[in-house]
Image: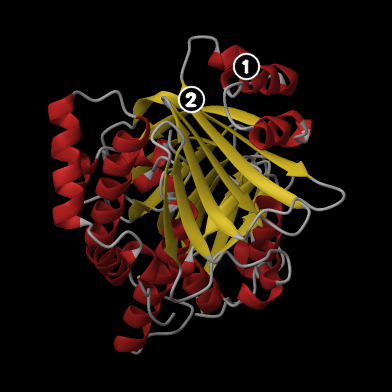
């Protein structure tokens, strides 16, 4: 789900399309923290790409704070451990999840659960923002829509993905492409798959296969492989994606080949992996006026730790907490918030999240480089030394507690 979240923190948030002028006070009831907001979705309906998403204990704690963990718990079995296998070396490493829950959720289950918690009218479909600028005279941010209309908002939070227009507006450096692409898909086993409930990563040569059971009959998998110039063309044809994946995985164990062969065509996607370099997150305000970013628009990761979704959920909890604290501390109406306090709330959000985001970004980058990177002996040695010094505990990042909403 790609969206821009416009938070209403005082005054009127208007959506203008030709002669239409809509006051969102008439459409949106108060959310749990008293902050009115609208989600702009460019598609005409709820949609998902990527088949599924691993949510580790830190992400599950965030879901609990958002109040949707109970409804999602029945959709997926818990993961008990992470297992890394190096076929070429004949080695296996198991790391139990000692604290907290971890599950792999179908993306549409997660999106629907999140959408169902929003007030009626909070999502406006078919709203694709094409540009953004700040209007000094009214101290508002103006989003121009593809339809020709516009939106004025006191606060804009860009959650519009790795190629974020909002990230460009606030001056973030562009994301960078990995040399690798990733295929993602679902495979259903009518008689049951028989896999253990674990996050499995299987490395052979320069390729990596990840596999996580969703339930007793459904498995989510991803295949990280060498990117090619034909990826953009192949990505439009699920049959071609499956054929290419089978060719690349031909030397893998039979069960992996069968998993790819029997995958659901409609679930298959192929994307070139991108990342925002850890060193690009060391400096900068990550805010321009009352505009900032969250999720992949700020910290796009590779799939090597499975933390992209969980980190975005953490962002949501911190954002709500920072806005709510400002409203409470200054005794203002729970509906209104001054422009100054809105900017202070965004600064506190960024201050709280910056180090966590930097840690995850660096750890993901090092892990991905070691798993599938084309490294020289010296570069590999440097990565290993940094991992030992900085990230000795392989699952410490999953034990992070975002705190109360």
**Quarter of the view holding residue 343:** bottom left
87 relative to 385, above or below: above
CA distance for labels 1 and 2? 11 Å
Q: Quadrant where the C terminus lies?
A: bottom left
Instruction: Tell me where residue 213 appears, x and y as whole percent.
Output: 66, 54
Residue 348 vs residue 259, the one in the foreground = 259
User: Looking at the image, can residue 56 be seen?
Assistant: yes
Q: Residue furthest top?
A: 229
Give the labeled residue for mark 1.
247
Q: Residue furthest bottom?
A: 331
Secondary element at tag 1: helix
Residue in the image at 24% along x and 58% along y: 354
Which residue is depicted at the point 34% across and 52% down?
292
User: Residue 358, how many percent across, how many down?
Assistant: 24, 52
Residue 51 versus residue 388 in the image, above or below: above
In the drawing, does residue 50 fall left or right of residue 405?
right
Q: Regarding mark 2 in the picture, which secondary structure is present there? A: strand
Q: Residue at x 33, y 56 (%)?
A: 290
Neighbor class of circle 2 (other Cα within 10 Å; few <14, some 14-19, many 20+) is many
Left or right placement of residue 154 versus residue 285 in this view: right
- Residue 42: x and y, percent? 62, 40
Marks 1 & 2, CB-CB < 8 Å contact: no
The mark that comes first in sequence, 1 or 2, is 2
Q: Which mark is residue 43?
A: none
Which residue, as the protein is rendered here, is positioned at the far right? 190
Colouring chosen for the image of the structure: secondary structure
Mark 1 or 2, closer to the camera: 1
Residue in the image at 48% along x and 25% along y: 225
Q: Would residue 295 be found to the left or right of residue 107 on screen? A: left
Q: Position of residue 36 (x, y in %)?
A: 54, 70
| Residue of label 2 | 225
Q: Would residue 288 be seen by someone viewing this image from the given angle?
A: no
């Amino acid at each position: 789900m790609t969206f821009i979240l416009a938070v209403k923190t005082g005054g009127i948030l208007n959506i203008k399309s030709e002669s239409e002028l809509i006051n969102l006070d008439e459409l949106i009831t108060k959310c749990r923290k008293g902050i009115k907001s609208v989600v702009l979705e460019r598609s005409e309906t709820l949609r998902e790409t990527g088949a599924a998403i691993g949510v580790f204990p830190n992400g599950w704690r965030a879901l609990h704070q958002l109040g949707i963990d109970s409804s999602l718990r029945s959709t997926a079995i818990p993961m008990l451990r992470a297992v890394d296998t190096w076929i070429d070396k004949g080695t296996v490493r198991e790391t139990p999840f000692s604290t907290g829950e971890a599950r792999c959720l179908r993306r549409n289950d997660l999106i629907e659960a999140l959408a169902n918690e929003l007030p009626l009218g909070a999502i406006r479909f078919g709203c694709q923002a094409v540009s953004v600028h700040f209007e000094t005279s009214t101290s508002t941010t103006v989003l121009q829509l593809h339809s020709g209309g516009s939106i004025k908002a006191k606060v804009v939070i860009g959650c519009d993905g790795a190629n974020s227009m909002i990230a460009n507006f606030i001056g973030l450096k562009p994301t960078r492409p990995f040399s690798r692409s990733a295929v993602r898909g679902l495979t259903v086993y009518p008689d049951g798959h028989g896999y253990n409930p674990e996050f499995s990563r299987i490395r052979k040569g320069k390729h990596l296969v990840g596999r996580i059971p969703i339930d007793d009959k459904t498995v989510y998998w991803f295949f990280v492989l060498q990117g090619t110039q034909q990826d953009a063309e192949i990505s439009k044809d699920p049959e071609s994606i499956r054929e290419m994946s089978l060719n690349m995985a031909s030397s893998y164990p039979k069960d992996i080949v069968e998993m790819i062969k029997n995958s659901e065509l409609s679930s298959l996607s192929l994307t070139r992996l991108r990342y925002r370099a850890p060193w690009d997150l060391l400096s900068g305000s990550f805010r321009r006026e009352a505009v900032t970013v969250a999720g992949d628009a700020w910290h796009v990761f590779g799939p090597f730790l499975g933390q992209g979704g969980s980190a975005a959920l953490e962002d949501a909890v911190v954002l709500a907490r920072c806005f709510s604290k400002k409203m409470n501390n200054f005794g203002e109406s729970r509906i209104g918030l001054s422009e100054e306090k809105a900017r202070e709330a965004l600064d506190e959000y960024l201050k709280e999240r910056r180090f966590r985001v930097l840690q995850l970004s660096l750890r993901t980058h090092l892990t991905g480089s070691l798993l599938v990177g084309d490294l020289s002996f010296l570069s590999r040695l440097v990565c290993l030394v940094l991992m030992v010094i900085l990230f000795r505990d392989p699952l410490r990042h999953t034990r992070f507690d975002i705190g109360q909403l």
